[in-house]
Image (cartoon, grey):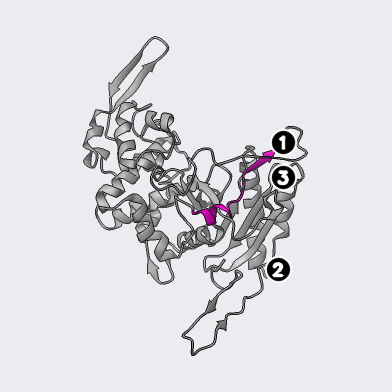
Amino acid sequence: MKTRRHFRVWTSLLLASAFPIIAIAAPEAPLASPEVAAAMQPYFDSHKLAGVIGIVANRDGTVVSENLIGHADVEAGKPMSEDNVFWIASMTKMFTGASIMMLVDEGKVSLDDPVTKFLPHLDRWQVIAENDKKHTLLKPVARPVTIRHLLSHTSGLAPHPELQQITGADSVPLAVRATASVTGPLQSQPGEKYAYGNQGMNIAARIIELVSGMPYENFLQQRIFDPLGMTETTFWPSDAQIARLANTYGPNADKTGYTKGSVSYLHQPFSDRVHRFPEAGGGLFSTAHDILRWGMLLANNGELDGKRYLSPAAMDELRKEQTGTTKVNYSLGYHLRNGMFGHDGAYGTDLSVHPGTGMIALFLVQCSSGDQWEARDNFLKAAAETFEKSKQGH
């Protein structure tokens, strides 16, 4: 990993043949946090987790601590490594929200634009007023569904359109998914309830395509991943990346070992760009280096390495509760937790950034047992303790 000077760096400069190869010495690796190690140990003792990367850093990229615990591949005996690739699942939502805010900064969209401004066919949406085994009563929408509703899970949309429930999450283009959304009625009036899901994110991604004039994946690549040096973040990991994919595990029936799982939410082979399409609510794969880069941008109020990606006003929106009267701690593709913001993913990956202190806490795991959230919360407590100790010079 090559973030700042605090990760191991394996770089050499190969100049013209007249010049020698200049090796850049790698600084000493950051120390593991004993607090993080202690917090995670019970989950390894009970085989609830097989491998974890836990990183605590500050806003300038200085890594306070780095814990590499357990195995990425239990059967092969491969220890967890900085090189491992993870399915980051719903952490993908962070990039959908940020992409919309880039377009807001450019004056091309407004958060309160009705979705029908960009997708007129969705003017046929209706809302379920009554529903039982004998009948379903639909009523007109009381107000337009807006982009803000899409990104804050308050649109009334079901988690997934009916089409995706049949074909799978990533088997049809975003344009088809946005069209399919009209076939399923809204579950509640726009703005009145919070219901977490991916359908709103995929419609928002389609709006990004229409407004920017490029495929959603190209927008992410050109506006975020390439400029930030996030070279391993993709919807289509290569075979070489798949070889470094951290396996998914949970405890076996008698909790004496592990049961191996898989990323069943997405179709394989993951490298198939012909039959697989971006899932804006949960399709990305990434690494510790890349997600830490994004965490640094968030911790620096939308700016990194002298380049501004998001305005201060846009960052204010991403850090602000956006769920209206529901008062759920969620923004525009970002969770809000204990003064921090970021997002987690289905198998336990998590990025949490504290805008006040500048702490960046990155938790990478592939856990299928359901214990990942408790483990994540305990990691964040230990990360805060580790970060505070670092400020005191311990």
Q: Position of residue 11 (x, y in %)?
A: 55, 75
Secondary-structure class at tag 2: loop
Kindly identify the amino acid type of the residue bearing the numbered disc 1.
Asn
- Residue underneath mark 3: 43
- Image location (x, y in percent) of residue 245: 58, 52
Inter-mark Cα distance, 2 to 1:
40 Å
**Farthest-out residue, top:** 134
Callout 3: 10 Å neighbours few (<14), some, many (20+)?
some
Q: CA distance from mark 3 to mark 2?
A: 27 Å
Residue placed under numbered mark 2 in the picture: 394
Residue that carries the numbered disc 1 in the rendered image: 252
Residue visible at 26% across and 47% down in the picture? 210
Q: Verify whether residue 20 appears in magenta.
A: no
Residue type at mark 2 is: His
Is residue 302 shown to the viewer in this render? no
First in residue order: circle 3 vs circle 2: 3
Tell me which segment is drawn in magenta.
238-252
Sequence-wise first label, 1 or 3: 3
The answer, for residue 273, to whether it is visible in the render is yes
